[in-house]
Image (tube, rainbow, N blue to C red):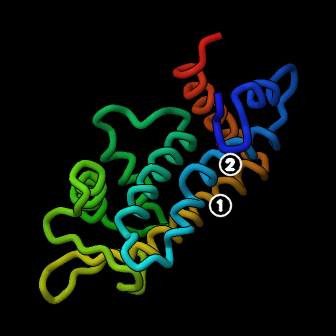
Amino acid sequence: MKLSPRFSEKQWNTAFDGREDWDTAIEIVADRVKGRWLDAAGRLIDERHSGFAILALDCIVLESLWGFMNGKAVPRGGERQVYRAVLMSPRFGWTETQSDSFRELVRNGIIHDAETRSRWLVERTVPRTVVPQVNKQGDYVLNRTKFHGALVALFEEWIAGLRAGDVVLRVRMRQRMDQIIAKHYVT
C-alpha cells in the first residue's frame, strides 16, 4: 500500500522494525501531506480561478494534520473542535465565530456543494491578512493565498518539532499512521 507518492506501508514498518528510524518515518508523513495535497495546492496558487480547489485541498491538509498532531482521526461530529483548534491557534488567529462559520459555510459548502455559502467570498490577494474580513456589503472575504501560506507554515512548524525530537508529537504521528495502515492493510 502506498502511504505517499514515494513510500509504502512496508517502508513505514521497516522504520520501526526493531528500532525507531524517526527520520524515515517523518519523511514518509511529510511526503504524504506534501505529495498528496500541499504541493498540488501550491501549484494552483497563482491560478486566477483556483481558490475553491486550493481551499478544498487545504481543508484536507488541515484535517489530516490535526489527526497526525493528535494521534487520531477527526472524530465523527468533531469537525468543529478540529477547525477551532487550528484556526484559533496563533498561526491563524481567528475567532470562534469565524472558525465555525468557515467550517460550515466554506469547508462544507465547497466539499458538498462546490460553492461557498451565506456571503463568504474567496479572493486571491485580499484582505492582506490570513484573518477573514467583513467588507462594506457585509460579506466575509477570505484571502485563500494567505490561508494556504499559514497552513504551510503550521505544517512546517510541526515537521520541525518532529525533527527536533518532540516525543509527544512523534508518538501521536506514529499512532495516526498506524491507524491509517490498520484501516487499509490486511496482514
Quote the CA–CA distance across marks 1 and 2: 12 Å
Residue 170 is left or right of residue 21, and the answer is left
Q: Does residue 112 lie above or below 106 as drawn?
A: above
Q: Which residue is mark 2?
A: 31
Mark 2, residues whose alpha carbon is within 10 Å: few (<14), some, or many (≥20)?
some
Q: Does residue 34 lie above or below 79 as drawn?
A: below
Q: Which amino acid lies under the numbered mark 1 shown in the image of this protein? A: Glu
Q: Residue 95: which quarter of the image? A: bottom left
Residue 58 is left or right of residue 160, and the answer is left
Mark 1, residues whose alpha carbon is within 10 Å: few (<14), some, or many (≥20)?
few
Name the spot of residue 176 as percent of width and height, x first.
Answer: 57, 32
Name the spot of residue 178 as percent of width and height, x first.
Answer: 62, 26
Q: Does residue 5 lie above or below 105 as drawn?
A: above
**Picture quarter with the C terminus:** top right
Residue at (25, 57) in percent of width and height: 114
Q: Residue 107: which quarter of the image? A: bottom left
Q: Which amino acid lies under the numbered mark 2 shown in the image of this protein? A: Asp
Point out the frontmost of discs 1 and 2.
Answer: 2
Along the line of sight, the residue nearer the viewer: 29 or 42:
42
Residue 184 is left or right of residue 99, and the answer is right
**Picture quarter with the N terminus:** top right
Along the line of sight, the residue nearer the viewer: 180 or 22:
180
Is residue 127 visible in the rendered image? The answer is yes
Along the line of sight, the residue nearer the viewer: 136 or 81:
136
Residue at (62, 54) in percent of width and height: 34
Q: Which residue is mark 1?
A: 156
Number of residue marks? 2
Name the spot of residue 21 as percent of width and height, x first.
Answer: 84, 35
Residue 75 is left or right of residue 77, and the answer is right
Name the spot of residue 180 as percent of width and height, x first.
Answer: 56, 28
